[in-house]
């Protein structure tokens, strides 16, 4: 398992309007790699992520990159 593969598969699924499958793959990815910025970023951009998960993803992005001015 590699975080890049989870991100790649999640992105392909999301781009092909398979958001539920993308969310499942990305969620599995962050459970295995909780410190991967790319996976959390993709989850934060999914339209079908519920409000709690989206908020968690944004909080994780801020935790992983605390000096990024684009993350508020």
Image (cartoon, grey):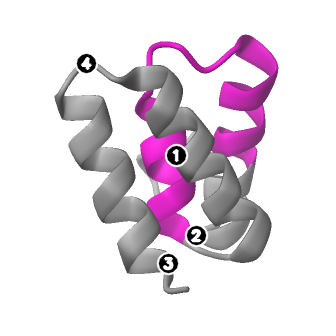
For disc 3, the marked residue is 3
Q: Secondary structure at mark 4?
A: loop
Graded by Cα atoms within 10 Å as few (under 14), some (14 to 19) or many (20 or more), the crowding at tag 1 reads few
Label 4 vs label 3, nearer the camera: 4
Q: Determine if the magenta segment contains residue 46.
A: yes
Q: From the top left corner, tell me how far across and down residue 28 is, in percent.
A: 68, 56
Give the residue at x 25% y 18%. Answer: 17
Magenta span: 37-59
Q: Earlier in the sequence, mark 4 or mark 2?
A: 4
Q: Quadrant of residue 8?
A: bottom left
Q: Are marks 4 and 3 in contact (CB under 8 Å)?
A: no
Q: Earlier in the sequence, mark 3 or mark 2?
A: 3
Q: Quadrant of residue 52?
A: top right
Q: Secondary structure at mark 3?
A: helix
For disc 4, the marked residue is 17
Is residue 37 shown left or right of residue 64? left
Q: Secondary structure at mark 1?
A: loop
């Amino acid at each position: 398992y590699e975080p890049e593969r989870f991100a790649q598969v999640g992105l392909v699924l999301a781009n092909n309007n398979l958001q539920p499958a993308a969310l499942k793959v990305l969620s599995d990815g962050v459970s295995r790699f909780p410190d991967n910025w790319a996976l959390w970023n993709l989850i934060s951009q999914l339209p079908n992520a519920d409000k709690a998960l989206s908020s968690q993803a944004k909080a994780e992005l801020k935790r992983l990159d605390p000096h990024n001015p684009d993350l508020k």
